[in-house]
Amino acid sequence: MAKKDLTKETEGFEEKLQNAKKTLDVLMNPDITLSQSLKAYESGMKELSDAQKILEQAQIKITQIKEN
């Protein structure tokens, strides 16, 4: 795996986490409507799911490296 690919994945992971944190801030707003809450929740869960996939792929790569 090229170093550039790893950097791209790391940036993607960090960006996903930052987006999820921003979504949490939105959800903590007591003035948010139910509709806005549902949209924000859905968006935040997608960001976390995408971050989880990036982590899982990194774990697979680490396992492959250890096996070689």
Image (spheres, grey):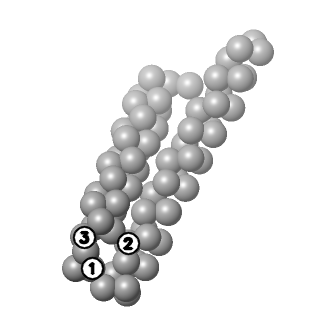
Question: Could you tell whether 38 is left or right of 27 in the image?
Answer: right
Question: Could you tell whether 58 is left or right of 8 in the image?
Answer: right
- Identify which residue is drawn at 59% across, 47% down: 53
Type of amino acid under label 3: Asn
Type of amino acid under label 2: Ala
Quarter of the image with the C terminus in it = top right
Check contact, mark 2 vs mark 1: CB within 8 A: yes
Check contact, mark 1 vs mark 3: CB within 8 A: yes
Measured Cα–Cα span from mark 1 to mark 3: 6 Å
Residue 19 is situated, as x and y percent measured from the top left of the image, at 34, 55
Question: Could you tell whether 68 is left or right of 26 in the image?
Answer: right
SS at mark 1 in the image:
loop
SS at mark 3 in the image:
loop
- Residue 66 appears in the rendering: yes
Q: Which residue is mark 2?
A: 40
Quarter of the image with the N terminus in it = top right
* Label 2 environment density (alpha carbons within 10 Å; few <14, some 14–19, many ≥20): many
Check contact, mark 2 vs mark 3: CB within 8 A: no
- Identify which residue is drawn at 34% across, 60% down: 24
Q: Nearer the viewer, mark 2 or mark 1?
A: 1
**Taking 28 as reference, is 58 above or below it?**
above
> Quick one: label 2 or label 1, which is nearer the N terminus?
1
Measured Cα–Cα span from mark 2 to mark 3: 11 Å
Q: Which residue is mark 3?
A: 29
Residue 14 is situated, as x and y percent measured from the top left of the image, at 37, 41
**Taking 54 as reference, is 62 above or below it?**
above
Residue 54 is situated, as x and y percent measured from the top left of the image, at 54, 43
Q: How many marks?
A: 3
- Identify which residue is drawn at 71% across, 14% down: 66
- Residue 19 appears in the rendering: no
Q: Which residue is mark 1?
A: 32
